[in-house]
Image (spheres, rainbow, N blue to C red):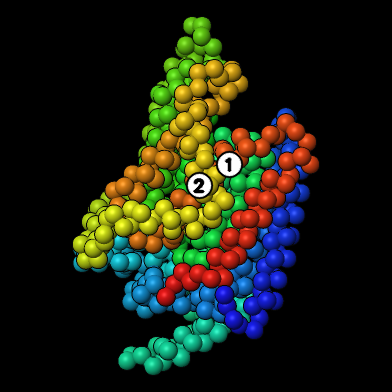
Amino acid sequence: MSTEPDVMWNLAGSAVAAALYLVFVCWGYQRLSRYAEKPCHRLEVVAWLFGLVSISFAWLWIVQESAPVKNRLGKAAFVLYYANSSGYFTRARYEQPSSIDLLAGYEDLMRKGDVLHTGTHPPGLFLAFHGLIAACNSSPGICAVLDATQPASFREATDVIAANSLRRTVPRRLLSADRQVLWLATLLVMFSASMTVVPLYGLLCRTCSIQAAWVGASLWPVMPAVAIFIPKSDTMFPLIGLSILWLWLTAWDQRSLVVAFFAGIVSWIGLLCSLAFLPVLLVAALMTLGKTWLFPLERDHDLGSDSTGSNQSVNAGFRRWICIGAAGVGFIIPSICLWQAVNVNMFNVWLLNYRNHAGFYEQYPRTYWKWLLFNPLELAFAAGWPVTALAIAACWSVLCRRIRRNDLSKAERQVTPDVITVVLSIMFVWGLLWLTGKNSGEAARLWILLLPWLIWLAMIQFDEFVSWKSKFKSRDWRTIALLATQFLVCLLTVVRVNGFQ
């Protein structure tokens, strides 16, 4: 535990923030529960989600400032500035300030075989910092807001960086614009982490009750790894990953070519930043396969069984295949545009990134069986034990009960296939990553992209654990206990664990 003078005040402030968060979640829970048996007004749901995003952002700010000095928001300046921890700002600011030049020589840069941050990532994060630098240079208004909102911990950290930079062999002066860019990047990462609750809620509504979806979305900002690893891009990736799943599954269900096209574009944006989104695309494919071919009796059940219904089913199936084409077009068009504009072949870049990533384990060998044992434990601490326990229970429930049960009612048959598809798809992809040793190190950070899947599994089990047919007062203690325990786990983890050296 930190022995700093303000530790008790910080913990008290975090406790108050957690209590206010809990009150807000319970209030929204009661309001949305009215719509469990009837359609809800979309504007009210949007308003509640907007409020959840806002209070999530406030919580992430407060809980980080409650940590020891070295782990407060000032850590963001060190993590984003120094090349050893990321390197994206360094290259965009000092080494290749022209985004056109960066892209034109990106394939050659990848061929150098760097196995750390530069060689294993596509150019998306570098381009993001080019954009942030341009925004700060062109807008005095943005710069004024950024200067006014920096906390003391961040200012002190940038002062240390400025002093260190002048002592370099080749001195560098840290400009005010540099401080503004670093703080803007931190704010955007925190906002992206907060916005993750929106697609998470949308996905949870597919398999869970509206109450469980709301509780599950509110759990995301309380995952310990999210607060610990801000401002790393890993905490921003879940927003993109969940958006891909949400858009694609919605497009497939509604047979919407437009939504499928946007799913393809968002998938391309994700892969422009990291190959870590490949497991997300695999989960999307498996869920689509499960919904369409593994449970044919439930597919398009509303179309009927007569000849007209058969024709409609054929047309629906054909349109879904067209959706795959629309998503492919949304993915390929940006690649072609980038190739024609700056002569960079993203498919070559992705292949080189994959090879460089494989080279990491050749240069830094790991003991397979040790990481096989350690990764699940680190994952449990990263997500929080309450969520992890519920997720494990959901997997056990599906494997041991739901798949074997033959006496399902008609209502249950309409829901169970989606639940089984979600659980088995997530278990397969995560198990594949774990058993193949594709991530033998830093599971708490590198698997943040996948942590919302644990919440999805947990809420499937929570839906079974809580009887929504009863009055709110008879079940609110379970919801409050889950949230309160997760808050406690998050706070204790943040104040004791340092995610960066």
Residue 398 rendering spot, x and y as whole percentages: 49, 32
In this view of the protein, which residue sits in the foreground, 155 or 67?
67
Camera sees residue 145: no
| Residue at the farthest top position | 307
Residue displayed at 31% across by 63% down: 103
**Relative height, residue 129 to residue 250 (above, below):** below
Q: Amino acid at mark 1?
A: Met
Look at the image and tell me in which quarter the C terminus lies.
bottom left
Chain-order first, disc 1 or disc 2: 2
Q: Quadrant of residue 56?
A: bottom right
Q: Amino acid at mark 2?
A: Leu
Residue 126 rendering spot, x and y as whole percentages: 39, 66
Residue displayed at 68% across by 59% down: 55
The residue singled out by tag 2 in the image is 454
**Relative height, residue 470 to residue 385 (above, below):** above
Camera sees residue 364: yes
**Relative height, residue 165 to residue 23 (above, below):** below
Residue displayed at 43% across by 69% down: 130
In this view of the protein, which residue sits in the foreground, 328 or 395?
395
Label 2: few (<14), some or many (≥20) within 10 Å?
A: many
The residue singled out by tag 1 in the image is 459
Residue 215 rendering spot, x and y as whole percentages: 65, 46
Q: Is residue 135 left or right of residue 339?
A: right
Q: Is residue 140 left or right of residue 448?
A: right
Q: Is residue 265 left or right of residue 118?
A: right
